[in-house]
Each structure stands twice: as C-alpha cells, then as structure tokens.
Amino acid sequence: MTASDALFDIPEGERVPLRRIVVLAGASGSGKSSVAGRLGVPVVRLDDFYLDIDQPGLPRARGNVDWDDPGSWDLALAVEALLTACSGDVLTLPLYDIPTSRRTGSETLDISTAPAVVAEGIFAAQVVVPLRSAGVLAGAYYLVHPRTTTAVRRFARDVGEARKPLGTLVRRGVALWRDEPRLVRSWIAAGLEPLPREDAEDLLARVIAR
C-alpha cells in the first residue's frame, strides 16, 4: 500500500488529513531553509530527495550532471513522504550529502503534535499539483529576493560548505542568476504566491495556524 492509498482509504466526504503541507519554493540561496527552520513545525527538506550521482539517465549540462534539472530529483518519493506526513504521526526522510551527491542514510521525525509540515526546496513547485489534487495543500509560496543578493549568498554558502569544485560553483551561479526570471514565471504558472522574505515568517505562521 502506498502513502496515497493509506490517505484515501476512507469514505468520500471524510477525507480529513491530520495536517496539511505548506510549500516554500525559491531560488537556491534565497533563504528558504532559514525561514522554514524558524516556524516551529517539522520541515521536509526536498533537496534530500536528490538521486544518487550514479543513477542512470540523470540530466546533464556543460558536461556534468545538471542538479538544477528536476530530472535529478525523485518527485514520486517526495510526494509519497508528504502524503505520509498528512496521514501519520511518524515520518522517515532521506539524508543527502551534496558534496558527494549521494544519500547517506535517513532520519525519523515524530510529527504527532505538528499542526502542519513545511516542504522547502528548489524543486518545491513540483509537488504543488499533486498535493493540491490530494486536498492537503495549505498554501504554496516562493520567496521574493533580489537575485544578485541571492547569487552572492548562494556562492558564499556553497564555497563555505565545499559543495562542489569552485569552477562548477561559478558556472552554476552565473547560470542560475540568468535563469531566475524564468523560474519565477514557472512558479507563478504553477500557482505559487510571491512572498517577500521580510514578511515571510509572519505570513507563514498565520497559514500554519489556520
């Protein structure tokens, strides 16, 4: 039985989830993790659902795996975990090591007292349609932040954490800076609402308290 089966194995009209999901998207380095971590509810780090580097068929760009392509990421497993979060009190999530591009284990969270769960990551917009269809979406937002500021923050973080070789980080940073306007258009098309970073915590706290 899948998580979606478990959630909907009850009569029509009585599909009341234990909690709902707040989705937070944004460019890499925009502050999603920081904002989500201050809300006082469990956080699903969607970046931990990346595929291992030796997974066959990963998308490639500029001679390397394109980790900014949703094809490098396990959408089905991420949605299954989020549906589980809506129907149960224990949630097991993968742990992913970005420098080695591999899953390194898992963690189990007790979410029994949580009123909601926040799902954040660069591919967060990908889960919006499945969650909305399942009736468990509390809200979907993307952080609004100057893209040059985001690019500087991202580069400093990635260098500090030695996420990838320096040349790769420079090339990726330039590509992401150029691509951010397109990403924003795609988030809007997916139904995500803009969320100024300075107001993000207050607004999201109100959504969670509904």
Image (spheres, grey):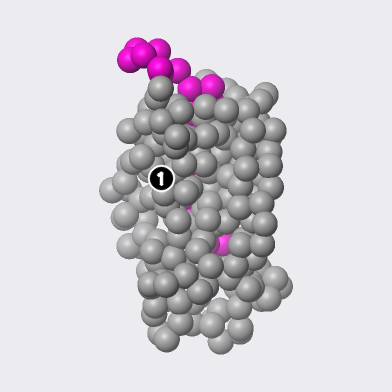
Give the left or right position of residue 71, taking residue 24 as reference.
left
Q: Nearer the viewer, residue 176 or 103?
A: 103
* x and y percentages locating residue 122 in the rendered image: 48, 57
- Total labels: the figure holds 1
Q: Give yes or no for residue 24 being in the magenta stretch.
A: yes
- Above or below 44: residue 134: above
* x and y percentages locating residue 203 in the rendered image: 54, 33
- Above or below 146: residue 77: above
- Residue at 41 percent across and 22 percent down: it is 9
Please, which residue is most extreme toward the front here?
A: 1
The reply to whether residue 14 is visible in this rendering is yes
- Above or below 90: residue 192: below
Tag 1: Cα neighbours inside 10 Å, few (<14), some, or many (≥20)?
many
Q: Amino acid at mark 1?
A: Val
- Residue at 54 percent across and 22 percent down: it is 18
- Above or below 93: residue 65: below
The reply to whether residue 142 is visible in this rendering is no
- Residue at 68 percent across and 76 percent down: it is 162
Q: Main secondary structure of the magenta part?
A: loop
**SS at mark 1 in the image:** helix
Give the left or right position of residue 129, taking residue 115 as reference.
left
* x and y percentages locating residue 180 in the rendered image: 40, 64
Q: Nearer the viewer, residue 128 or 100?
A: 100
* x and y percentages locating residue 126 in the rendered image: 38, 50
Magenta range is 10-29
* Residue denoted by label 1: 127
Q: Give yes or no for residue 163 being in the magenta stretch.
A: no
- Residue at 41 percent across and 45 percent down: it is 127
User: In the rendered view of the protein, which quadrant contains the N terminus?
Assistant: top left
State the image quarter where residue 56 is shown: bottom left
